[in-house]
Image: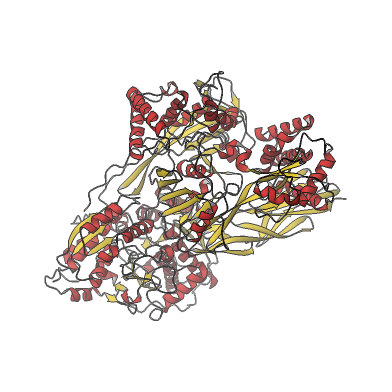
Amino acid sequence: MGNKTKHLDRRAFLSQLGVTVGAASVGTAGYFAAPPMAQAAMKPKGNIPDKPIKTGHITFLTGPAEILGGPGLRGHLLAAEEINAAGGLLGKRKIETLQADEAAGTDANVKELRRMKLSEGIDLFTGVISSGNTPALGPVAEELGVLTLFNDGCTDFLFDKAVPNPKYVFRVTNIQSADGITAAVGAATSWPDVRKIASIQPDYSYGRNVHEHFTLALSRMIPGTEVVAEAWPKLFTTDFTPHITKLLAANPDLLIVGLWGGDYVAFYKQALRYGLFDKMKVATTLAFGGVPHAIGKDHPEGVLAGVHANYHFLFPSGDRWPLNKSFVERYHTRWKEYPSFESDGGYAALYAYKAAVEKANQLVGGWPEDEAIISMLEGMGLDTPAGYLYIRPDNHQGYKDAVTGLSKNLPGYDFPVWDPESIISIPIRNITAPPNWPKPGQGHEESTAAANWIKTTWPSVA
Amino acid sequence: MRAAPAVLACLAVAFFFPRAHAGHEIAYYPSFYPQEITVQTLDPATAAEQLSKNSLHAYIGATPKFSAAVPEHLEPVESLDGFLVLSFDPASAAFQDREERCAAGRGIIRALSAEVKGVVLSAYPVTPFHPDYLHHLDRVEEASQALMSEQGVPPDLRVKAQGERAEALAGTRLAPEGEHWDVRLERVRLSALAKEFNLPSSVQSSPPWQKQGWYQAYRLLFSAMADPALKKNVELTYGRLIKGEYKGRKERINLERRLVADLAFECRRMVAGYTLRREYYSADLSGGIENVAYDGQSGLNSAVFVRTAKLKDFPWNGWLYLGTEGSAEAAWNPVAGFTDTAGKLIWSALGDTALMPMPYNASFIPNRVSAEVGSADGKKVFNFKVPPAALTFKPGSGELRMVGAGRTSSSKITYRVNASLYQDGTKTEVSDLLYAYIFAFRWGEKSNAGDRAFDPVVESATRLMRELFVGLRVVRVDSKTTELAPDIKYIRETPEVEVYLNHGKSDPLEIAAMAPPWSTLPWHLVVLMEEAVKRGLAAFSEMEADRTDTSWLDLARDPKIQTELRALIAEFEKQGYRPDELTARVSRDDARARWAAIKKFAETHYHLLVTNGPFRLKEWSENKAVLEVVRELTYTWGVGAFDGYAYPARAVITDARRVDGKVVLDVELEKVVKAQRRYSTLREAFGKEASRGLFRIRADAPYLLLNANGEVIHTGAASHVADGRFEIPLPKGLPAGRYTLLAGVFPDGNTLRPGVTRLTFKAGT
């Protein structure tokens, strides 16, 4: 991206963003310059102890967020089982996983992490879904010196503010601001003629984040957009009728929805009664953001169905990216369901650790120190089910191409999936603030570095 | 952009900080899955039709009447409904000899038709649906053998049958109406066994033995006993069991066995079998429900069902449609109303109990209280010194008093109460907890002959608590602020209360359930109801309503009562009224605020059923009630909190053998496996690492060793030594003789239709 250009064509701009549409696309334009990491077994160097590697994994095992935490843990366990079946890390060290329920709350999670490190002696900490928890656990992990690969907890705040100079803490999920921006790119790509925008967002910080980044990014890609209606249902709202009638009254071209889980389902079922989906285009950040099978086939087709900008099991498609196909098959065999973006995260995190351990071993021999593993993780590129995962060395944030797609009912699935022809993939570097971009409070007061970066550098296209 | 959200409510406060570190995930959705529950009374044929069409999610209380085969998308749930009981005519000169009577009884049971659906013929009162089944396994099998070997039934013996099922069972032996009969065969439902089985939970203390076979046998058989000496023995044994007068598990089980044997001895009334309730729910993808938990004795009509049932098409939220048998005639008052099937279901969603019955055994789930039983030094010892300043209540008036010096108790329970907002916006406070006791002591005990503040139903429902209660002390009230998202915080208050009781030998959870400091109703509502009853406007119980010829208090559906209660509220608001017992804790202004809150609630919702439970009455008609979810942040539990109780695994013991000095059990595990939104049953060796989804299954494997006299001489737990294998080391030095080992394997404590086995062997020299 260059400096602000006044008269850039929208199509050219989207092209410049690297947006590809359709199942054939696969993330190709990331930071990842070197060939994908070799997966062939390397003979470990030096003496490797056979003591198991203890992994602490805190995630939601109960409550509404279990639809996120459960798949994440299942991804983690599948990876552990596969690695163990092959002899363990460096062929010797089996992975043991200690689990704890993230639903216990932030204070309890912090205590549990301390207990896991100090009493159980964990070597690695993984999991964590909540963006309220990663900023609390990140500094503790740094203090304890425990190598950490967060599954989610995607808030920009983690590396913008809470752990601005991470040593031990990494995260494999795309950052939160990507949600709204990905939906905006998806909407601009799918429906370039929309002008009147309506927004329905949960009335808490995530909703504000989506609204801000979506409207900001869309306004740069489609000039003349105007927000004609905003609906902010209170948290725990079950009756969306007043909001739906308000949105319909504004007669928008496009509705952006940031509701998730059961709230999204209650909303869409009520909206169906009003024919809302026939009267406007609908983009979402999280319609498919839980487990794939969570919602029914009455979900309307043609909705831009977000997956937290991360992963859907149908993409990248098998012929282009066999790793995903085989992962989906193995995951389905093991857990009798299809993986979600959290499954991919849990799986990829452990394999990233494995790759870093192997690489470090080749360099230094024996079981590598954490410092050596960390240096291998920094800047690592890795083949994962979702495509290439790149871990930026400056902020330890994992980046993979952001994806979204249009909902469709395909035979063979009890739930709606993406229309393979509609899948939109965006190289994450093109919708994320680059390394060393000033963080909030460093010369700007935007809510995220990404928001400031867009305002500063994205052109208003003609 | 949206501005900052406003303050939510009293306890729950939201703040806005301009930060962006909340994800979309909200870790806590208060209350349970459905956003709305419709409860409608339906006849079984209509229910079958609606279930078949997927316009009903479950039918509760009875079996739907299908006109054809049961559709494949419907799943059955079986639970214990009651007993078939055979009683000899006490006025008849025939069958005066015990042996003759017992033999005739067995003969009749054997001769009954075994073809009637939903009936299991069995001559022993403890069934596989009772948590103590293992304790009686040898006796159950002996009773069954005695039944099979019984030949003689007087050919002219006539049976008077009460009820459709009993008539079908009696077959050709049925005595024509008005003609001579020798024995009466009737179905006794659990709900009729003891009044407290059927009462709303707001004033009832929970007898921890309510689901035990020995207790139900007592309720069923004791009144038919005639031998004074035997009756006295039974009363002594029963008294020891409920007062905890035994040393450990072995003695307790021996008492239970002796009680049942004595109750059955005379054969004046005999258990002929038990009846099962077969309810159905829709498991259709995607119109059905999943995550279904139910109680082994009350089936789907249980608090755990409405706290787990999830619509398949919704991660949470959605509209749940339930049908119930019968009509909704019982008054809707939370003291002694809600007694029919519909009422019980509705109240299970509106109200909340301190502890909830564990669905698959006799224990409890800490719900609105957590409890620590024992002394501060961690010993579970007895004879606690009760602080002189601890509070007690005067029987008959409920007046608060100090316990005074020198009192002791056999147990001390320290409760932490999960307070929350009542649905009128007022807080659950210590005054509400105290007032629940005040009410029980006032209305459960007659102070004089003309006492208007007395109800016999309250008397029986609260008797256990009143008898055991010694005193209580409010230790403190803790307050904690929790952040749900950076811009949403809430405050929860947790009163800590010590309760002193004279019962100390039970399981800690059982003791905790006897007299917990809890009220699902605010004190001002209780006062309002009391005043209505004292003024003769209505009665709490149906029995008292009949006796006094007043109406049965209904807080929603009786417009006359509504008008009168609203007038009372206005009067009390004006006065800032609070009962004398609360004047030290509640100011006149606080009281006024409470009356104003309930007035507003009544104006908004058109009824007075104010609780701190998970659902609120939204609308109703003659045969229907619609309940809406209360997603209120101070509420204790959230969506998914009780998921672990759905689809419990069960064990099957496939072989038991004696090998050297131990007994080896081969055990398989039957568990439900979830595949997306579909479920199937898997049976495999009970692995040491067995799990349901992501949760490890705990293997409880108790055993009893009996000597040749049928006396329990040893108890213990089998070790899970390998996948599919458990081992029980036999005690060394057993005297020569014949022994019987009774063993069970209860995955996660599931004693419903349990995997049990009996092994008889000789040991010693």
State the residue lying farthest toward the bottom: A319
Q: Position of residue B388 (x, y in %)?
A: 53, 22
In this figure, which colouring scheme has been used for the structure?
secondary structure
| Residue A368 in sight here | yes
Along the line of sight, the residue nearer the viewer: B499 or B673 = B673
Along the line of sight, the residue nearer the viewer: A29 or A31 = A29
- Drawn side of residue A361 relative to residue A30, left or right: right
Q: Position of residue B342 (x, y in %)?
A: 50, 44
- Dividing the image into 4 quarters, which one contains the N terminus of chain A? bottom left
Along the line of sight, the residue nearer the viewer: A71 or B62 = B62
Q: Position of residue A92 (x, y in %)?
A: 54, 70
State the residue lying farthest toward the left: A6
- Dividing the image into 4 quarters, which one contains the C terminus of chain A? bottom left
| Residue A280 in sight here | no
Q: What residue lies at 56% left-to-right and 39% top-to-bottom?
A: B198
Position of B44 relative to A74 (above/below): above
Q: What residue lies at 83% left-to-right and 36% top-to-bottom?
A: B96
Position of B22 relative to B568 (above/below): below
- Drawn side of residue B286 relative to residue B703, left or right: left
Q: Position of residue A279 (x, y in %)?
A: 25, 64
Q: What residue lies at 32% left-to-right and 47% top-to-bottom?
A: B488
Position of B648 relative to B194 (above/below): below
- Which quadrant of the figure has residue B211? top right
Tally of numbered tags: 0
